[in-house]
Image: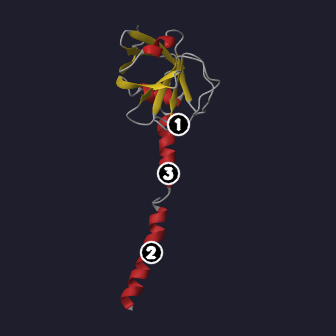
Amino acid sequence: MPRKRLIAGMLLFLVPSLSACGVGTPEVHNTETVNFYQTLESVEGRQVRMTAGDVEVMITLNDSQAAADFAGMLPLELSLIERNDFAKGMTLPRALTTAEETTREYEIGDFGYWAAGPDLAIFYDDIYDQTIVPVIPMGKAEQGAEDMRNTFGTVRLELVPETE
């Protein structure tokens, strides 16, 4: 009986101690994650060269945290995935930040991120009114996105040096 009381007393002491240390409180982790993404430098206006075979598309990034996170991963070589005859997808090696507004609206040339993939998409056709899944807009290709329609295999994504 004294042993049970000793164990019960230790548990009563340890549980509040662990709570005070933040064990089991995911808010601490989430705050650190948000703070990390808030420190990402904006890449607004920076360009990404997307090359698939002989097709090259220049994408201008926006000021989203997802775009900054993505730029930090470059260069990448990824497999192209056909997405319902209107976009090419690419699965990233890890997820990007998702602390962004999403949309289902798109235009030809839009470049975005679908967190559930985690996939990128470049839209080369506007045959649908909207996407099936919500996408975080990360940038836009002013021209050449239509040429992605007939590309297959791998794609290389690289940040263009600011001096080019």
Q: Quadrant of residue 132?
A: top right
Any mark on residue 28, and which? 3
**Quadrant of image for the C terminus:** top left
Of residues 54 and 72, the one drawn nearer to the viewer in this rendering:
54
**Badge nearest the viewer, 2 or 1:** 1
Secondary structure of the residue carrying tag 1 is: loop
Residue 81 on image: x %, y %: 43, 26
Asked if residue 103 is positioned above or below residue 149 in the image, the reply reads: below
Tell me which numbered mark, 3 or 1, is placed earlier along the sequence: 3
Q: Is residue 104 visible?
A: yes
Of residues 159 and 43, the one drawn nearer to the viewer in this rendering:
159
- Residue kind at label 1, given as amino acid type: Thr
**Badge nearest the viewer, 3 or 1:** 1
Is residue 108 toward the left or the right of residue 21 in the image?
Answer: right
Task: Residue at 48%, 69% (x, y): give it.
Answer: 16
Tell me which numbered mark, 2 or 3, is placed earlier along the sequence: 2
- Residue kind at label 3, given as amino acid type: Val
Q: Are marks 2 and 3 in contact (CB under 8 Å)?
A: no
Tell me which numbered mark, 2 or 1, is placed earlier along the sequence: 2
Q: Where does label 2 land, which residue?
A: 13
Disc 2/disc 1 C-alpha distance (Å): 39 Å
Secondary structure of the residue carrying tag 3 is: helix
